[in-house]
Image (cartoon, rainbow, N blue to C red):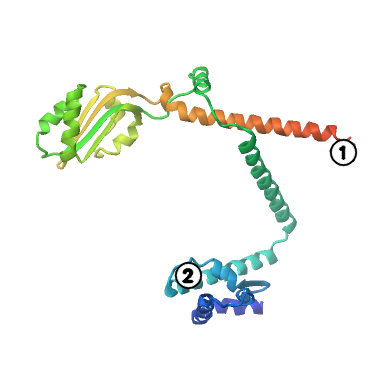
Amino acid sequence: MLQIKQTLGFIHHMKYFSAIIIIFLFCSCNKTTNSSLEKEGIIQVGEHILTEQTLKEHLPEGINSKDSLILAESYIETWIKENLMYDLAQNNLSNEEEIDQLVENYRKSLITYQYQEKLINEKMSEEISEEEIKDYYEKHADKIKLETTLIKGLFLKVPADAPQINKIKEWYKSPSIKDLENIEKYSLQNAVNYDYFYDHWVKLDDIIRLFPPTWTNPTAMLKQQRQIEIEDSIFCYLLNVKEVLFAGEKEPYEYAKSNIKEMIVNQKRLEFLQKFENDLYKTAVNKGMVKRLKKQN
């Protein structure tokens, strides 16, 4: 208890910390510092000793002395508190065997996981063909449903007083290449935001965030119309929806493709590990590596 009280009091003597750290930093800058000195302890809490070398490893290189001093003080104080709490917990817990078992179980799981990953990287190819992905999509199409609404189209945000505002309101509705070129030229000088996504699906939620909060119930509006115009005192917001797929509908292949590939890879990894474990088990039994020491009743 005396040691803990002394150490607790030590936490508050930052000037003493600073003195130690300044000496440490000075020694660290000296290229002729003896390696045995670097390993010397500078702080002790119970049986725990903080060495100069450990402190040095936790200080980033290339920082000035003032910053080094601040970081060192912070690290030392944290180190003391952690070890005080650890000793207190260790002295007041009676289930050390259970903790040791948990640590051992974690260690076994970690080693096994790392070896499994090594096996997979060495033995298994994660290349998935387009044919495999399409086959999975066709077989599970009834289960691959959208969780959110998707759209294709274009979005424009322009100042409410922008020149030729009536023209841009005509162009954004038009499917012609010429009007699209007009939009692109106009947007370079006048648009605050221009997003073209006629050729790929985007989440409606991502586009809604670009609108002012006055646009309420957008899904219901899109079921009635595909050109949306909303204005406030500052901006004019324009959205032309070429295609829409609502939540609950079948997910389009090009949108589902990456998720399907990931599912196939995970399934193959699982099958590979299961086969490897079964083969390992059979080999061990056949070679007499597994021995039953006691018969079960």
The image shows residue 168 at horizontal and vertical percentages of 14, 31
- Near mark 2 (Cα within 10 A), the count class, few <14, some 14-19 or many ≥20, is some
Dot 2: element? helix
Res 149 quadrant in image: top left
Label 1 belongs to which residue? Answer: 291
Would residue 64 appear left or right of 49 to someone viewing this image? Answer: left
- Sequence-wise, the earlier of marks 2 and 1 is 2
Residue at left 65%, top 79%? 2
Would residue 198 appear left or right of 26 to someone viewing this image? Answer: left
Looking at the image, residue 177 lies above or below residue 88 = above
- In this rendered view, identify the residue nearer to me: 64 or 259: 64
- Near mark 1 (Cα within 10 A), the count class, few <14, some 14-19 or many ≥20, is few
Determine the CA span between mark 2 and mark 1. 56 Å
Res 27 quadrant in image: bottom right
Under mark 2, the amino acid is: Leu
The image shows residue 279 at horizontal and vertical percentages of 75, 31
Dot 1: element? loop
Q: Residue furthest front?
A: 32
Under mark 1, the amino acid is: Lys
Residue at left 64%, top 41%? 118
The image shows residue 272 at horizontal and vertical percentages of 65, 31
Label 2 belongs to which residue? Answer: 71
Q: Quadrant of the C terminus?
A: top right
> In the rendered structure, are the residues bearing label 2 and label 1 in contact, judged by CB atoms less than 8 Å apart?
no
Looking at the image, residue 235 lies above or below residue 70 = above
- In this rendered view, identify the residue nearer to me: 294 or 285: 285
The image shows residue 10 at horizontal and vertical percentages of 56, 79
Looking at the image, residue 92 lies above or below residue 245 = below
Is residue 248 visible to the viewer in this orientation of the structure? no
- In this rendered view, identify the residue nearer to me: 26 or 14: 26
Residue at left 56%, top 70%? 55
